[in-house]
Image (spheres, helix red, strand yellow):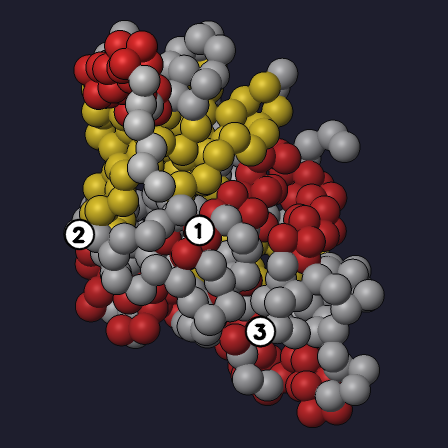
């Protein structure tokens, strides 16, 4: 059977073909319209927080260059991670694009996603509070470029961008439309000193879902204080070399959260007094907050784990009591009760907190930090 078109249909068919093939691409696919041109700004031109030292080998390192000769190689390697470093800026842009160059091709860990390990995390200040706005998910081993937020109403806002927790960055740039303005956020008053956290992978941020959920970051936003994250995953050993480095800083408070990386009560009792004596000798007035080992959720059934964590906390408390008996001032002790709750739902692997665990941990520590800082509730 042969199908024949009537001649009076042909003009309509030719018109349809013309419309489909002669129409501009943007009319066929509005999404293909060219994106507005961006102007790029180096993150270093904005207000950088979270760096304890300026004399670093690379700008986003966490320890000074000289420390490579004094700390263990494992600590030095971890100090190249950018955990806790952030930048504050103001812009009236309706979109924000971030381009960041990573140090390591290892985008994720067994217990952490690429968003936390290698991504960036954006917060915005609304009505005096920092609220999450967007995250940049790392999917390339070197340079990532993503528009992480768009369709914003054009008005001036203050933003804070956190850098990766378990990767380092070589460079970071902010891209905004050419017609937008952007500048460094006002620096904090010089009287507002940072809080320095020294600790384990938990301090560094394992296993938060994104950079802004590490507990030092949460506390920084709650207390409206800058902070320095000196968490060294698996390598917080209360070494004198680290204590000496910490005394080079002039913080509002030292938070010492090392017990999960110490092997026994004996090691705790041997190392803690030496470490704290170094801090006290050079920073005699700076408050120190000592944090017990969290109660792991499986210690009710795992006998060896229960014994070791209990012994470490008991040894830690003995050291603290001796310090107080000797007349030490401005030392605050945080017991493990309710640091992450007792329902067993606050860790990803029995050790490292989930986001829920980090929020509980920050809530438990906040009253002690407020007391050390002499802040009202």
Crowd rating for badge 1 (residues with CA inside 10 Å; few <14, some 14–19, many 20+) = many
Q: Distance between the residues labelled 3 and 1?
A: 25 Å
Q: Mark 3 points at which residue?
A: 260
Q: Which residue lies furthest to the front in this view?
A: 1
* Sequence-first disc among 2 and 1: 2
Residue visible at 32% across and 73% down in the picture: 74
Is 270 in front, or is 185?
185
Is 163 in front, or is 133?
133
Which of the 4 image quadrants contains residue 257?
bottom right
Report helix, strand or loop for mark 1.
helix
Q: Mark 2 points at which residue?
A: 57
Residue visible at 46% across and 39% down in the picture: 135
Q: Mark 1 points at which residue?
A: 115
* Sequence-first disc among 3 and 2: 2
Residue 272 vs residue 118: left or right? right
What is the quadrant of the C terminus in the image? top right
Residue visible at 43% across and 28% down in the picture: 149
Report helix, strand or loop for mark 2.
loop
Q: Above or below — where is 105 with respect to 304?
A: above
* Residue 202 pos. (x, y %): 55, 62
Crowd rating for badge 3 (residues with CA inside 10 Å; few <14, some 14–19, many 20+) = many
């Amino acid at each position: 059977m042969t199908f024949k078109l009537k001649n009076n249909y042909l003009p309509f068919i030719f018109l349809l073909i013309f419309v489909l093939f002669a129409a501009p691409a943007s009319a066929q696919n509005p999404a293909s319209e060219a994106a507005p041109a961006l102007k790029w700004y180096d993150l270093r031109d904005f207000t950088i927080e979270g760096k304890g030292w300026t004399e670093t080998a690379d700008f986003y390192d966490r320890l000074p260059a000289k420390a490579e000769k004094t700390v263990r190689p494992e600590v030095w390697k971890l100090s190249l991670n950018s955990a806790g470093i952030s930048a504050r800026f103001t812009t009236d842009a309706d979109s924000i694009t971030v381009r960041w160059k990573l140090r390591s091709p290892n985008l994720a860990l067994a217990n952490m996603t690429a968003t936390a390990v290698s991504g960036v995390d954006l917060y915005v200040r609304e009505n005096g509070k920092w609220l999450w706005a967007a995250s940049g998910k790392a999917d390339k081993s070197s340079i990532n470029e993503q528009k992480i937020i768009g369709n914003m109403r054009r008005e001036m806002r203050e933003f804070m961008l956190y850098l990766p927790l378990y990767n380092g960055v070589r460079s970071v740039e902010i891209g905004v439309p050419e017609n937008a303005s952007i500048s460094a956020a006002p620096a904090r008053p010089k009287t507002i000193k940072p809080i320095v956290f020294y600790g384990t992978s938990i301090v560094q941020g394992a296993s938060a879902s994104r950079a802004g959920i590490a507990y030092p970051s949460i506390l920084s936003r709650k207390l409206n204080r800058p902070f320095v994250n000196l968490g060294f995953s698996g390598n917080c050993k209360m070494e004198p070399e680290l204590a000496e480095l910490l005394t080079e800083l002039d913080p509002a408070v030292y938070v010492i959260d090392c017990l999960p990386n110490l092997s026994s009560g004996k090691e705790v009792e041997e190392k803690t007094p030496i470490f704290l004596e170094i801090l006290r000798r050079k920073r005699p007035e700076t408050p120190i907050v000592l944090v017990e080992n969290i109660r792991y959720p499986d210690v009710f059934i795992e006998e060896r784990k229960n014994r070791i964590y209990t012994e470490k906390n008991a040894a830690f408390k003995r050291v603290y009591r001796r310090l107080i008996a000797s007349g030490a001032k401005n030392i605050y002790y945080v017991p493990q009760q309710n640091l992450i709750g007792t329902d067993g739902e606050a860790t990803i692997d029995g050790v490292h907190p989930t986001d829920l665990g980090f929020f509980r941990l920050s809530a438990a520590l906040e009253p002690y930090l407020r007391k050390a800082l002499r802040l009202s509730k």
